[in-house]
Amino acid sequence: MINLTINGKAIQAPEGATILEAARANGIDIPTLCYDKAVEIYGACGLCVVEAEGIPKLLRSCSAKCTEGMVINTESPRVVQS
Ligand code: FES
């Protein structure tokens, strides 16, 4: 299991889980448009972006994998503006 923080909440996610999967499994909603778990992920729309501490660009949560110690914010002003 991988330990990470989303919106100040410490959570665990299985190896290989995306940020979107980890968030939804813990009751944290991230809006999506092009994501459909029945088809291959291609990350086209950018609606699901989140901010990760220490990473300059916003991450597409439907395709970015969780990593140990990651600190994610899904509601920062930068995310909302994007
Ligand atoms: S939902 Fe479209 S890029 Fe993630």
Image (spheres, rainbow, N blue to C red):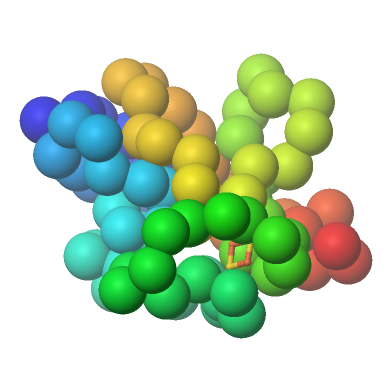
Query: Residue drawn at (61%, 80%), measured in percent from left and top?
Result: 33
Furthest residue in direction front, as rendered: 39
Query: Residue drawn at (37%, 34%), measured in percent from left and top?
Result: 66
Q: Is residue 25 left or right of residue 7?
A: left
- Position of residue 63 relative to residue 27, above or below, is above
Image quadrant for the N terminus?
top left
Query: Residue drawn at (31%, 74%), measured in percent from left and top?
Result: 38
- Position of residue 15 relative to residue 48, above or below, is above
Give residue 80's position: percent from left, percent from top. 79, 68
Image quadrant for the C terminus?
bottom right
Give residue 25's position: percent from left, percent from top. 22, 65
- Position of residue 60 relative to residue 65, above or below, is below
Give residue 27's position: percent from left, percent from top. 29, 73
Q: Is residue 50 left or right of residue 19?
A: right
Res 79 quadrant in image? bottom right
Q: Quadrant of ligand 1?
A: bottom right
| Nearer to me, 74 or 45 | 45
| Nearer to me, 10 or 35 | 35
* Number of disc labels: 0
Query: Residue drawn at (66%, 19%), measured in percent from left and top?
Result: 54
Q: Is residue 75 visible?
A: no
Res 56 quadrant in image? top right
Give residue 3's position: percent from left, percent from top. 24, 30
